[in-house]
Image (tube, rainbow, N blue to C red):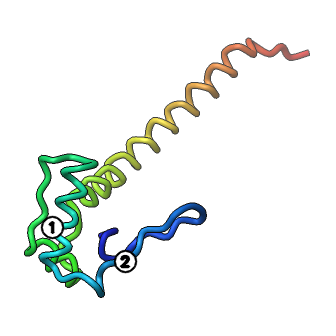
Amino acid sequence: MAVMDGLVPHSGQAMPAFKAVLNDGEVAQLTNYVLATFGDSGLHITQERVSELRAGGASSPLLDVAQLGVFVGGPVFLVLFVILVILVANRRYLMAGPTRRA
């Protein structure tokens, strides 16, 4: 969680880490303030969720979706790539025409 661990980009302004400074309730309040002011006000972070994240608990459901996408999308991409290679090879063969023997 960026609020607890901070962000240090290669260039530009960094965001400080609040893990050692704020307790779980304060991190939840800060996160909810930032979400309501600058992001999606429909999201709400609880103190329990912050405690779970601090303890290394369950990660974001988006990670599960991304892993599923790689698991399903990888083989689909591979099959489509093989089909494309076969079609290109067949097209070159057909466009070359029959070869004559002397």
Q: Quick one: quadrant of the N terminus?
A: bottom left
63 vs 47: above or below: above
8 vs 33: above or below: below
Q: Residue furthest right?
A: 102
Q: Quick one: quadrant of the C terminus?
A: top right
Q: CA distance from mark 1 to mark 2?
A: 15 Å
Q: Position of residue 74 (x, y in %)?
A: 41, 49
Q: Position of residue 63 (x, y in %)?
A: 28, 60
Is disc 2 placed on a helix, strand or loop? Answer: loop
Q: Which residue is labeled 1 in the image?
A: 29
Counting residues from the start of the chain, the first of labels 1 and 2 encountered is 2
Determine the image quadrant of residue 95: top right
Determine the image quadrant of residue 90: top right
36 vs 79: above or below: below
Q: Position of residue 67 (x, y in %)?
A: 31, 58
- Indicate left or right for 102 with 72 as reference: right
The residue under the point 14% across, 52% down is 43
Determine the image quadrant of residue 97: top right
Image disc number at residue 17: 2
Circle 2: residue type: Ala
The residue under the point 62% across, 26% down is 88
Give 47 or 102, whichever is nearer the viewer: 47
Image disc number at residue 43: none
Give 91 or 58, whichever is nearer the viewer: 58
The residue under the point 38% across, 42% down is 76
